[in-house]
Image (spheres, coloured by chain):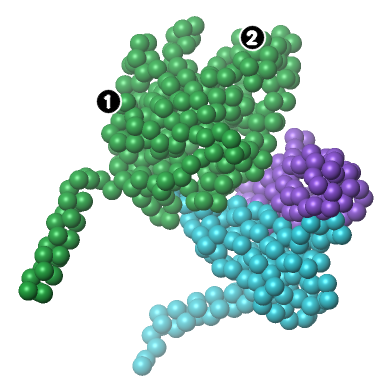
Chain colours: A purple, B green, C cyan
Amino acid sequence: MASGVKPRVKVPKSAAAGSSITIKTLISHKMESGRRKDKQGNLIPRSIINRFTCEFNGQPVVEVAMEPSISTNPFFQFDAKVPESGEFKFTWYDDDGSVYEAAKSIEAT
Amino acid sequence: MKNKSLNGVFGLVAVTTFAIGTVSVWAETAPKPAKLVVNDESEMVTEVKPAEGISHLATAYDGWRFRASETQAVQSDDFENPGMIFVEQALDNWNKVDGTEGKSCASCHGAPEESMVGVRASYPKWDETMGKVATIEMEINNCRTTRMGAEPWKYTGGEMTTMNALISVQSRGMPVNVAIDGPAQSAWEHGKEMYYTRTGELELSCASCHEQHYGDKIRAETLSQGQINGFPSYRLKNGKLNSIHARFKGCVRDTRAETYKPGSQDFVDLELYVASRGNGLSVSGPSVRN
Amino acid sequence: MELTRRDAMAIGACAVVATAVPFQASAATEAAMAFTGGAEPTEGGVTLTTPEIAENGNTVPIAVDAPGAVAIIIIAEGNPDPKTAEVAFGPMAGAQSISMRIRLAGTQNVVAIAKMADGSFVQASNAVKVTIGGCGG
């Protein structure tokens, strides 16, 4: 699954210092639950993204432990504080050991 | 006196009910009013009065209008619309050199934002060099095999459908305007005949559901008019972009008939006819459906 | 009243169903217990937003808002793997809320339990109807 996985994040370019902003994230991933069977009747092995984290300047915003009940192409929306200018870092951890990353900087005004 | 006036009221109710019953032969139900504005800036035309002689629809409605508000909201925002991730993936393929000629799509067509504007709105259309009505998929494979020296893509495969989405989104907001006359006329007429012909063990035509019963429930699901202006379509059901011919195949299968092959001239003709039923609606793909 | 053989079989079949259901419930209960450490959550203090009827069980939008929470667990009681997500809020969280899209195997209750800063637990639960599609699902 490591190929073709596309993370997308939406973060405003700037915000008033001390305010909260809304962040949206979406990543392309099958999130194979491990419960489905192929045409031959064999169980398709589980292959999901099992963890997502968002940090701002190294400090945690949210961390999500993800299970097979999360839909294909996982989507999250949450709020973050912007006390100062800096960088949001987003990381998704795949069952197969792959790590997908995205970063967005924001200017506090 | 009191009784008499009550009788009058009942009589009126009865007459009204009767009138409603006779106005409409079938049970088509108009969807609730709603505006599709993508990214808070581009408003799509989701209802239009079709030209005479194309269909029996009084109004053509974008399939978005028949969906639940949660699903409608997902299509209203390009970030939330998972179909748009696949548009980004297709852009990688657009720029990727493939085949013996050392070319990519970009080698001839440059940036899709410039070269592909309006393409989706006019397809399927008559292709003079092929000598037949062609779909976007056929044009893509024609490019791949004759200009790039590359292998053709599977008609309803992932690369093909995502590339179609990349091309479609360049025409988003433009009115569908497929030509049904001239050299395309016989294909259009054949497509129209297919649309109204009952097939399969269930003896259903396209019209049985999508013209005579749109807005009604089929089991727990609300039937749309089967318009294709929003394709390729991201389905919540399978988490990927779906092509027009894959949808046709599913529908024909559900009538319990032998289906046509995606990419066959029969389905191309049907696509031309169905597209013409939505002439005037905005190209709105990649759409989000259940 | 005399029990016919058919009646007895029907009762037997019901018994099988009856034993299967608590098994499902217990997987959900286990997930909740693991999160709360056995504490009993109280109702209120967390808002769970779900559609009343999901257009498709594969992608159901949900939102949880629990002001003052440090963590939230989301449990889909009727799923084969009921635990759906566990969310921890860090110091940079602007609100203790999150939206996501989840899978629901059928009509069921979705439960959100929030752990508050004082170590107490609150919960909310919504029933979501999942329909079967008209055209081959």
User: Which chain's residue wears label 1?
Assistant: B
Percent across and percent down for residue C94 are: 79, 57
Q: Is residue A18 visible?
A: yes
**Residue lying at 64% horizontally and 65% vertically, measured from the top left:** C48
Circle nearer the viewer, 2 or 1: 1
Tags 2 and 1 on a common chain? yes
- Establish if B164 lies above or below B139: below
- Establish if B12 lies above or below B187: below
Q: Is residue B254 visible?
A: no
Of the two numbered discs 2 and 1 on the same chain, state the one appearing first in sequence: 1
**Residue lying at 58% horizontally and 28% vertically, measured from the top left:** B169
Q: Secondary structure at mark 1?
A: loop
| Outermost bottom residue | C1
Mark 2: which amino acid?
A: Arg
Percent across and percent down for residue C99 are: 68, 55
- The image quadrant that residue B234 belongs to is top right
Disc 2: which residue: B147
**Residue lying at 81% horizontally and 57% vertically, measured from the top left:** C93
User: Which chain's residue wears label 2?
Assistant: B
Percent across and percent down for residue C26 are: 68, 75
